[in-house]
């Protein structure tokens, strides 16, 4: 009998912990746990409730009881005589009430339970790792009685599982808030902005307006009055923008830059009217620490089109409108029109932009973790170039990609990145942090400029970093060049790892895989995007994984953005992955913090019951 119970409890643990590890919402986990517990304890009705920071009961699950019962308890304060659950939460100890009709703790709540035929209730507090009561787990019965030994074991297990699930839910909610909100202003941040723009662009029939605005002369205010005044000014601008009403969404993108998305704007007239209202919000002076500051912002705007343009293109158009506004209508508004952009202008501007950033040492490396799916561990990182603008905003490579078509810029950027990643790798090694490699992307220009091998070796030797830590990423189209292929072979002979980037988007054939000296293949994001919806795409990815494993070539899935994609890749045996689902690109110190604080652990489908149990 005990053996069967142990097996059932083990199966219950595995099921619930797997759900927790894969990010199933807590309400769903709680409902599942109640149903499983009721299946193991016939005659019992299970409920799970949370206790909020004010000490109020917040029912979460009770699938066998009427919804009205939970609604009646919602918002009740815990106390020394508030039924079984409220009392258990108040004292932090289990409360067994074998007869609701006669127990004083149920005096004010009998009218809720007795009409439903509920005669007894046993409730146990759910506590956080720090000992704070965060919820209750209860069994109700239809006859006056207390729990038996089997039910006690079951409840102990369920309370422990609830504690793990609720802690994970709390952490997830805190991280969710941090991920989507700017810490200074409390507004939505760039990540939330990127996600919203992408979602809206996926509905081409629905037009919306995008405004980008900068605070004019913030740098001078910081220099003259101090950064505390500058920060207060940023918060004030955010507050004034948010006060415009519920018809718009306001974001702080970083530094002095804000964005406003207006779902209701469907023509240029609406856009101009909204921009006028935004400018009007800045008319009143701002008083701060005895200083009177005249607020001024400059705005660029664009209306989404129905021609299938991408989110990146929409942002670029808004940026271009803002750029022109700064130069032609500072303190005003410019609406984007095609005449503002030509490819030559854009390329020229980006070349100059990147060149200036390199001159001023404003180019730096971010690193995106590469995750071992089975071990749920960071095993490598890919370096990605970023630029910090004069105003302190962080610009990703997509915003200056055309600047890299200039060979001088491309050469200088690679040199800059090599120095930084070698230095970062040296720091990680000195700390004893385990990392297989740091990857750098190289273009045809890097190979054509000459002395590449010498530059790579010199950068890493200057920091005493062995070359086997360096992974070279090249695209299929770059590798198709015979001279490049021969250089790649020499680099590999020096101990560097070679990865074929964006596999599946270029012109290489499968036969090239046996001819080129490769250590890794990186499956392009386009395949991962369609993994769950396109059976042909899924079959191709499975075949690539199988083929790479047989050829003893490592394989990495790029652009993993959802837990469903991660779970599918894990299911078909993909060993390595990277993408926003696991981690966004971050600076070197943050990588070190991840490796130090969590032993490089990142949530993956492999982070299942055993790990969660050992970590609890």
Image (cartoon, helix red, strand yellow):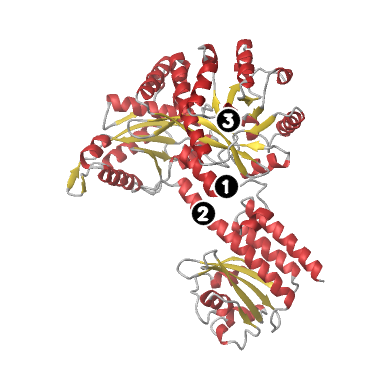
The one nearer the camera, 33 or 503, is: 503
Decide if residue 335 is in sight here.
Answer: no
Q: Is residue 381 left or right of residue 295?
A: right
Question: Mark 3 sits on what residue?
Answer: 469
Q: Is residue 340 left or right of residue 493?
A: left
Residue at left offset 71%, top offset 82%: 143
Circle 1 sits in a helix, a strand or a loop, which is it? loop
Counting residues from the N terminus, which is met first, the one under dot 1 or under dot 2?
Answer: 2
Which quadrant of the view contains residue 19? bottom right
Residue at left offset 63%, top offset 69%: 47
Counting residues from the N terminus, which is met first, the one under dot 3 or under dot 2?
Answer: 2
Question: Mark 1 sits on what residue?
Answer: 599
Question: Mark 2 sits on what residue?
Answer: 173
Q: Quadrant of the C terminus?
A: bottom right
Circle 3 sits in a helix, a strand or a loop, which is it? helix
Q: From the top left corner, tell me how far across and down residue 43 is, in percent.
A: 74, 75
Question: Closer to us: mark 3 or mark 2?
Answer: 3
Above or below 551: residue 103: below
Above or below 372: residue 63: below
Q: Is residue 556 left or right of residue 226?
A: right
């Amino acid at each position: 009998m005990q053996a069967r119970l142990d097996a059932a409890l083990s199966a219950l643990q595995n099921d619930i912990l797997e759900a927790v590890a894969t990010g199933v919402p807590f309400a769903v986990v709680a409902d599942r746990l109640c149903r499983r517990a009721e299946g193991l304890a016939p005659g019992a009705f299970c409920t799970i409730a949370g206790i909020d920071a004010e000490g109020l009961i917040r029912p979460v699950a009770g699938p066998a009881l009427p919804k009205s019962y939970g609604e009646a308890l919602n918002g009740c304060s815990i106390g020394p005589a508030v039924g079984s659950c409220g009392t258990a939460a108040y004292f932090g100890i289990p409360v067994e009430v074998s007869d609701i009709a006669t127990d004083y703790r149920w005096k004010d709540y009998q009218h809720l339970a007795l009409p439903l035929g509920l005669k007894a209730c046993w409730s146990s507090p759910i506590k956080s790792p720090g000992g704070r009561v965060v919820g209750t787990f209860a069994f109700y019965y239809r006859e006056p009685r207390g729990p038996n030994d089997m039910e006690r074991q079951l409840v102990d297990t369920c309370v422990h599982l609830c504690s793990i699930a609720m802690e994970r839910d709390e952490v997830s909610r805190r991280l969710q808030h941090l991920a989507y909100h700017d810490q200074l202003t409390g507004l939505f941040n760039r990540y939330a902005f990127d996600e919203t723009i992408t979602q809206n662009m996926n509905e081409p029939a629905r037009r919306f307006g995008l405004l980008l605005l900068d605070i004019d002369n913030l740098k001078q205010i910081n220099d003259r009055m101090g950064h505390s005044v500058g920060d207060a000014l940023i918060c004030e601008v955010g507050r004034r923008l948010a006060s415009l009403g519920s018809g718009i969404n306001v974001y702080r993108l970083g530094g002095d830059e804000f964005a406003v998305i207006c779902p209701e704007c469907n023509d240029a007239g609406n856009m101009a009217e909204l921009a006028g209202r935004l400018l009007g919000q800045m008319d009143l002076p701002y008083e701060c620490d005895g200083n009177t500051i005249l607020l001024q912002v400059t705005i660029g705007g664009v209306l989404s089109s129905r021609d299938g343009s991408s989110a990146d293109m929409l942002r670029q158009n808004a940026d271009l409108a803002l750029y022109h506004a700064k130069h032609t209508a500072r303190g005003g508004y410019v609406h984007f029109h095609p005449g503002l952009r030509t490819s030559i202008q854009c390329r020229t501007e980006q070349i100059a932009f990147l060149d200036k950033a390199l001159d001023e040492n404003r180019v730096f490396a971010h690193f995106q973790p590469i995750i071992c799916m089975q071990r749920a561990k960071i095993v490598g990182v890919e370096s990605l170039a970023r630029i910090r603008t004069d105003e302190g905003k962080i610009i990703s490579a997509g915003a200056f990609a055309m600047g890299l078509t200039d060979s001088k810029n491309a050469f200088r950027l690679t040199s800059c990145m090599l120095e930084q990643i070698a230095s970062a790798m040296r720091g990680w090694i000195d700390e004893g942090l385990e990392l297989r490699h740091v990857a750098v992307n190289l273009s045809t220009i890097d190979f054509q400029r000459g002395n590449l091998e010498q530059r790579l070796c010199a950068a890493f030797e200057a920091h005493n970093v062995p070359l086997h830590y360096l992974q070279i990423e090249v695209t299929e189209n770059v590798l198709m060049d015979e001279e490049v292929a021969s250089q790649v072979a020499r680099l590999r002979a020096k101990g560097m790892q070679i990865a074929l980037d964006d596999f599946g988007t270029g012109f290489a054939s499968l036969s090239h895989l046996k001819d080129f000296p490769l250590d890794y293949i990186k499956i392009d994001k386009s395949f991962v995007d369609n993994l769950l919806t396109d059976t042909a795409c899924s079959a191709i990815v499975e075949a690539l994984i199988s083929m790479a494993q047989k050829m003893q070539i490592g394989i990495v899935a790029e652009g993993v953005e959802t837990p469903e994609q991660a779970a599918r890749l894990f299911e078909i045996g993909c060993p390595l992955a990277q993408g926003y689902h696991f981690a966004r690109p971050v600076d070197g110190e943050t990588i070190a913090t991840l490796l130090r604080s969590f032993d490089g652990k990142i949530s993956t489908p492999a982070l299942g019951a055993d790990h969660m149990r050992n970590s609890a």
